[in-house]
Image (cartoon, rainbow, N blue to C red):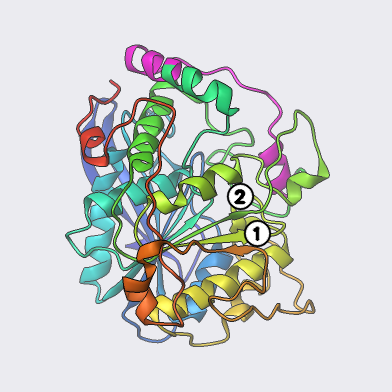
Amino acid sequence: MQTDRLGPPYQQRTLDLGRDWEGPVYATLVCRLADAPTDRAVLWVHGWSDYFFQTHVAEHFIARGFNFYALDLRKYGRSLRPYQTPGFCHRLDEYYQELDTAARIIREEGNSTLLIAAHSTGGLITSLWAHDRRDQGLVDALFLNSPFFDFNLPPSLRGPALALVTRIGRRHPYRLLHRPTFPLYGHSLHVNFRGEWSYDLAWKPLGGFPIRYGWLAAVRHGQRRLHAGLTVEVPVLVACSTRSLWAARWHEDAHRTDTVLNVADITRWAPAVGRHVTVLRVEGGMHDLTLSPAPARRFLFSELDRWLDAYLGSGAVVPPAQAAASAPMSSGEPAADAAAPHPRPPELGSSAHPSETTVHPPEAAHSPAAANPASPPVTRTALVTSEEPVTAEESATEEPPT
C-alpha cells in the first residue's frame, strides 16, 4: 500500500496479474476508508478511456458509511504501462481477474456488503461478471451509470455494421477505426475547454484512446451475451440521462445530454441484466452522470441514496448531500452550488418524478421486492436482437476475437 496520486487519505495497491501477449499486466486498487468503522464497501469501475479521479463520488459514499474502493483496470490509468496498447482487450472476461482479486481483498478487509458502481463499458463488464459469478456471493448490488449496452448506431445500420466490425476484429484486431475528429464529450468535461473537471488527459484523452476493431468485437460479444438475458440476482440500478445528442461541432446541449450513447438503448436493454432492475432517468445528465452539472448531480445522488436505503439499508454517517456538494477535491473538480435547494424526491414506487421509470412485470407480485412495499419493483423481460440470437451461456463459450 502506498499513498495515491490523489494524496491522503487515498491509498493504492498494485495488483500483479501475471503476463499477457504484451508483457506483464497490472491493475490498481485505490482505497479511501470511511471515517468511522463500517463493514460496507463500494467498488467503482470506470469506463472506456477513463480512470478513477472522481473524488466527490468517493466522498459521497464515505458520508453514507461506505469504505470506498476504485479499480483502474489493466491498460488504463494507473495500470497502463508504456509497452501496452491503451484499453485493448480481446474479450471482456479478461477483466474478471482483477475484479475477482479486488472483491476478495475488499471482503478480506472486513466488508460484508459490497456495492459495485460502474460506468459505461465498466457497467457492461461488471454486469457480465456478476452474472458469471452469481453463485459466489461476491456482490450485493449494482449501480450502473450509463452502461454500454449497445452501440450508438441507427437501427437500420446496426446489424450489418456490427457484423462487419466483428469479422474485421477477428482477423485484424489491432486495425484502427476511423471516426469523427471533434471530441464533443471531452470538450464538455475538461476544465481547459468547456467543462468543469480537471483530470489527466494522458489517461483520459480528450477524444479517447484510438479504437481498434478487436476491442469493438470484444464489446459486441459481451453485448450479445447481455441481450440474450443475464441472471444477475442482486438488485440493480441502471441510471442514464433523459436525452442523447450527436453533433459534429460544439453545442451547449452537450452539458445536458449523453453525447456518447443512445439512452433509449440503455433503457431498452436494462431489464436483460437481472430480476431486480430499477431504471432511473436523470434530467440534464451527461454520459458520466456523476460529472453532470450540479442540479443533475444532486438529483442522481439523492435517488441513488433512496435506492441504497431500500435495498442495502441506511448507513449514513453525515448527511450525504454534504459530500456531493462539497468544496473542490484534490482531482480539481468544482464545488457544487451549496446554496442551491436539494430536491426532495418522491416516495419510492411513486410516479411523482418523471425522470424515474420502473417496469412492473407479471411476476413482480411474487418477488422479494414485492414483499417489501418500500422497495423498487423488480423486472425480468425476454429481449431479442436483430443479429443471430444466442443464449447467455452459449455466447459465453463462443469463439472470442483473437
Residue 199 — which label?
2
- Residue 318 lies, with reference to residue 397, above or below; the image says below
From this view, report whether residue 211 is shown above or below residue 241. above
Q: Position of residue 202 (x, y in %)?
A: 56, 38
Q: Amino acid at mark 2?
A: Tyr
Q: Is residue 165 magenta?
A: yes
Q: Is residue 61 magenta?
A: no
Q: Which residues are magenta?
A: 164-192
**CA–CA distance in space, label 1 to label 2:** 7 Å
In which quarter of the view is residue 188 placed?
top right
Label 2: few (<14), some (14–19) or many (≥20) C-alpha neighbours in 10 Å: many
Residue 164 visible from this viewpoint: yes
Circle 1 sits on which residue? Answer: 332
- Residue beneath the point at 35% across and 37% down: 222
Q: Where does residue 395 sit, x and y in percent of width and height?
A: 25, 33
Q: Position of residue 167 (x, y in %)?
A: 37, 14
Q: Amino acid at mark 1?
A: Gly
Residue contact at pointers 1 and 2, CB within 8 angstroms: yes
Element carrying mark 2:
loop
Residue placed at 65% from the left, 65% from the top? 297
